[in-house]
Image (cartoon, rainbow, N blue to C red):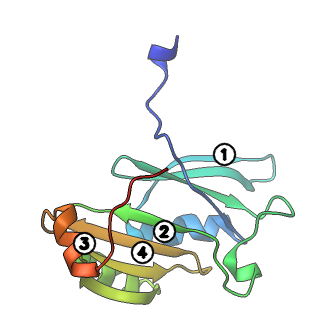
Amino acid sequence: MAADLPHRPSFIPSLAYKDNRAALDWLQHAFGFDPSEVLTDADGNIVHAEMTHGDGVVMIGAEWADWTRSPASLGGKNTQRVHVRIERGLDEHCARARQAGARIVKEPEDQFYGERAYIAADLEGHHWTFSQPVRAVSNEEMEKATGFRFAPLR
């Protein structure tokens, strides 16, 4: 029976929004995510939604419990950031997000780990990092560029 189930990623982040319906529309327009699942109650309220991008999935929910809040309800505070890897067109992606009203927290820039990345805050203040591979970088090159050292976990 398990062979008949669709593939799901091992990790699926879930973000809370004050207005999850507006978030679905905005994330589609600004970041190019595709709504893949939207469940509503008898009154038409969205009770669960998922969006996809490439092989990734993110759940878009409401403030449904005391412990789940949007950054918009917490003075802009975030406890997580979602990292989305795109294959090409990072600068154009950033321009699209900016045009849609994203606040660009960090402009596109080549990183020591071989990717070009930018950080954007969405309509309710969730932070998203978008990156695109630009070159292969060895651990030794990263250590030399940063002064950091790769260490074994104990």
**x and y percent of residue 111 in the render?**
25, 78
Q: Amino acid at mark 4?
A: Ala
Q: Residue at x 74, y 53 (%)?
A: 44
From the viewer's perspective, is 125 left or right of 138? right
**Disc 4, disc 2: CB below 8 Å?**
yes
**x and y percent of residue 123 in the render?**
57, 80
**Disc 4, disc 3: CB below 8 Å?**
no
Q: Residue 86: name its quadrant.
A: bottom left
Identify the element where label 3 is drawn: helix
Q: Amino acid at mark 1?
A: Leu
Q: Residue 14: name its quadrant.
A: bottom right
User: On the image, numbered disc 3 is attached to which residue?
Assistant: 143
User: On the image, numbered disc 4 is attached to which residue?
Assistant: 30
Q: Would you place residue 9 above or below residue 53 in this image?
A: above
User: Which of the labelled discs sits on residue 75, or is there none?
Assistant: none
Q: Residues within 10 Å of mark 3 (few under 14, many from 20)?
A: some
- Disc 2 to disc 3, C-alpha distance: 36 Å
Identify the element where label 2 is drawn: helix
Identify the element where label 1 is drawn: strand
User: On the image, numbered disc 1 is attached to which residue?
Assistant: 39
**x and y percent of residue 30 in the render?**
42, 74
Front residue of this view, candidates 134 and 21: 134
Mark positioned earlier in the residue sequence (2 or 1)? 2
User: On the image, numbered disc 2 is attached to which residue?
Assistant: 27
Q: Amino acid at mark 2?
A: Leu
Q: Residue at x 75, y 81 (%)?
A: 74
Mark positioned earlier in the residue sequence (3 or 1)? 1
Mark positioned earlier in the residue sequence (1 or 4)? 4
Front residue of this view, candidates 33 and 105: 105
**Disc 2, disc 3: CB below 8 Å?**
no
